[in-house]
Image (tube, rainbow, N blue to C red):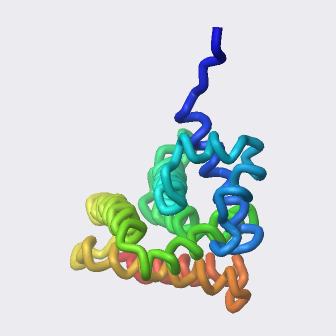
């Protein structure tokens, strides 16, 4: 009897290989042959999962976008997390900014996809959807902070969420190129959050 192939698992494995190659050598290093070697599958297996390189990149970006959102939500849902809005906001922003040492690889991949999306409508569409979901999450957190009285009642959650998304994105890039350290980036985030407090 022929061996059953779990195509979704294989697609995720290939997406991981794409991300590893990007983190190691940049977007230019992603070829079907190199991805197959990194994922330890045949080129035919890669081509059965993805018809084109663009389709493979799109799936990898969707995968990493989902993981970034899950990380941010996990920080909010941590069972031992204090219900302080400021603490939840601080943890969530650190997760979004990808500034911790263990986040470096994911930050490199994210940065490469953001740059590539400037010339790819399909990748840009995925990023717009991801940013919209993250914006909603931050709007909810900021609204929660207003409800608890920790954040200023005059605060506009939607406008502040846009500013915070831009801030986290900029800090990701600055930490990657060495302009900021993870510690100084966290301090920038903390100072911004403290400025929102009542």
| Quarter of the image where the N terminus is located | top right
Q: Position of residue 165 (x, y in %)?
A: 42, 75
Which of 13 and 67 lies nearest the eye of the viewer? 13
In which quadrant of the rendered view does residue 156 lie? Answer: bottom left
Q: Which residue occupies 42% across, 67% down?
A: 123
All told, the count of numbered labels is: 0
Can see residue 82? no
In the displayed structure image, the side of residue 150 where residue 168 appears, left or right: right
Residue 50 image offset from top left, x and y in percent: 51, 48
Left or right: where 64 falls relative to 103: left
Vertical order, 140 against 113 (above or below): above
* Residue at x 68% of width, y 87% of height: 180
Residue 138, relative to residue 193: is it above or below? Answer: above
Q: Position of residue 158 (x, y in %)?
A: 25, 73
User: Percent x, y for residue 43?
Assistant: 68, 47
Residue beneath the point at 71% across and 50% down = 36
Give whichever of 27, 156 is nearer the camera. 27
């Amino acid at each position: 009897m022929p061996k059953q192939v779990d195509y979704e698992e294989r697609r995720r494995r290939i997406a991981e290989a794409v991300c590893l190659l990007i983190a190691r050598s940049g977007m230019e290093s992603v070829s079907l042959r190199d991805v197959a070697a990194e994922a330890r599958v045949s080129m035919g297996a890669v081509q059965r999962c993805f018809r084109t390189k663009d389709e493979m990149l799109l799936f990898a970006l969707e995968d990493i976008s989902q993981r970034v959102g899950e990380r941010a939500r996990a920080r909010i849902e941590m069972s031992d997390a204090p219900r302080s809005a400021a603490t939840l906001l601080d943890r969530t922003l650190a997760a979004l900014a990808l500034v911790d040492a263990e986040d470096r690889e994911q930050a490199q991949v994210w940065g490469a996809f953001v740059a590539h999306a400037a010339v790819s409508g399909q990748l840009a569409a995925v990023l717009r959807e991801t940013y919209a979901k993250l914006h909603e999450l931050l709007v909810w957190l900021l609204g929660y902070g207003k409800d608890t009285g920790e954040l200023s009642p005059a605060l506009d959650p939607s406008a502040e969420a846009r500013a915070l998304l831009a801030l986290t994105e900029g800090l990701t890039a600055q930490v990657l190129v060495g302009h900021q350290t993870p510690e100084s980036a966290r301090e920038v985030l903390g100072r911004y959050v403290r400025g929102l407090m009542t």
